[in-house]
Image: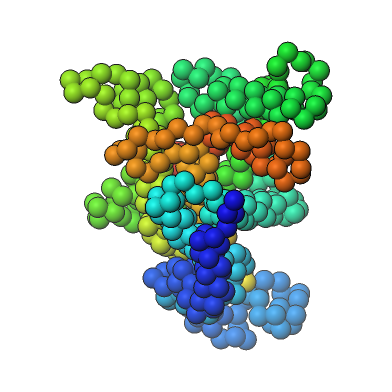
Amino acid sequence: MALFTVQLVFTLIFLSVLNRLSVHYSIGRWLLSKGLIRYLPPTDDQLRQLLGLSKSSVKTKNRKDNKEQQKSNTFTVPRDISLELVSKPVDLLDVIQLPYYAEVQWLFDFSAYAVVVYILTEFYYFLVPNSNEYNLSLIWCSFVVAFSLKVLLSITGLYFRGGDEAIGERSVTIVSASLFFLSAMIVLIADENFLEFGLVPAYKSFNESAFKLLETHNISDSTGSGGGAGPTSFLIIKFCLAIWCAFVGAFFTFPGFRLARMHFDAIKYAQNDHFSLLLLNVSFISPLFIILLWIKPIARDYLTIRSWSRGTIMSADSFETTRILIIVVVIALRLCLIKRYLQSYLNIAPQKLTIMKKERGRITNVDLQRMIARVFHYLCVVTLQYISPLFICLFMVLMMKTLGNYSWSSYLLPIIQMDEIPVNLDETTGPQLTLALLRNVFNPIVLRGLMGFMVWWLCSVWFVTSSIGLLYHSYFL
């Protein structure tokens, strides 16, 4: 059996290209260093000039420590100072020193190459449909998903290492995880005739295949249930999925809130551009349509079951492909709007200055400069919060397409059903037993149910958190 041939060539070529070209050409570097405008914090000389005072006559914060404050160049200015921030195009030297810049560059570049490898692999399988090779593009997709989750875990971990200053973020994260855990349990007990994840047929197929495998190799059933029962109960599987859902909810909470803030600001700046306004609103609301595609009475019944004047609108296979394509299109739209969202984030700096001018009192030059500078300082963190959920959803749906044995050509040709690939379970060697486990137990029916639920949950949490954030910014700020 051929394990790796053409796909291995694809992988080696693109690994070499990624290693050589990433130094000179980088999508992540181009994204952050081209087309964005940042706002510079005011210098001490600018603030003194606005006050009309010389360095020696500036009013210090504490007169008792006048000499020490002069050495540290700390002085106070009125909050309503007539200050205008200087704008400057972002260049490479500005972003290369920001926290998480390496993660942004690597994630963008590796994801781009992973998409190319996936497309070439799909084209290869279209030309050679009966190939027995392992699909190496799944490894690329898995790496992108794992690295994106690792990045979100690292950013979320900052809230738990931030001391008393981050107690609010920690509380929100914990509460979100708890609420999403409860919501997941409610969703998982919903009737399959309403939310059609395919978990029930997936569980039945998994249990039957696993029982046959254990029985063939004379392995006792750990549950002691016997009678053809599988190795685990459906309740345990749902509980494990609910825990995974809780972690996803915790990781996606603040990225969703950040997206809502950027969308709220981007809408304000696009009031005179009706086309951009349309794209922004469609991009924000589009995950709702993805959620509705898994509600059977709304989507499948009307599109594949209900008979109209010319019959059904599409076949069941075409409906599955349509769901995948819609998710890909939604993610592509959001990626196209990334610079507009990032620019709306950078525009927070003059917004903060405007809010400060409405307040009374004085502020030190250091605090004023820090308030403006920290907006640009967290640009890469905000970028990761925007792109990580998108890449997780994108590559999860690509993996669902491949592992679930779906077809891009279902509009033209019917899908060849390969729900279970027959494997000789009498083989007892380690590699052959592993192959039997992967192909018989984790067959396309099982993977369709699991991956379908995961993709739906990712899109749902991403939409729910951003919607709550938009309501907060619209009515409470």
Check the image and name the residue furthest to the top. 227
- Looking at the picture, tell me which residue is in the foreground, 123 or 162: 123
Can see residue 357? no
Q: Nearer the viewer, residue 360 or 111?
A: 111
Q: Is 454 situated left or right of 299 in this image?
A: right
Residue found at x 62% / y 52%: 146
The image shows residue 245 at horizontal and vertical percentages of 62, 35
Q: Position of residue 55 (x, y in %)?
A: 60, 85
- 241 sits left or right of 82 in the view: right
> Could you tell me residue 104's position as x and y percent?
55, 64
Residue 273 in view here: yes
Residue at left offset 55%, top offset 73%: 16
**For residue 73, which quarter of the picture?**
bottom right
Depicted 98 relative to depicted 3: above or below: below
| Horizontal and vertical percent position of residue 225 | 77, 15
Pick whichever, 44 or 257, lies toward us. 257
Residue situated in front as seen by the camera: 364 or 264? 264
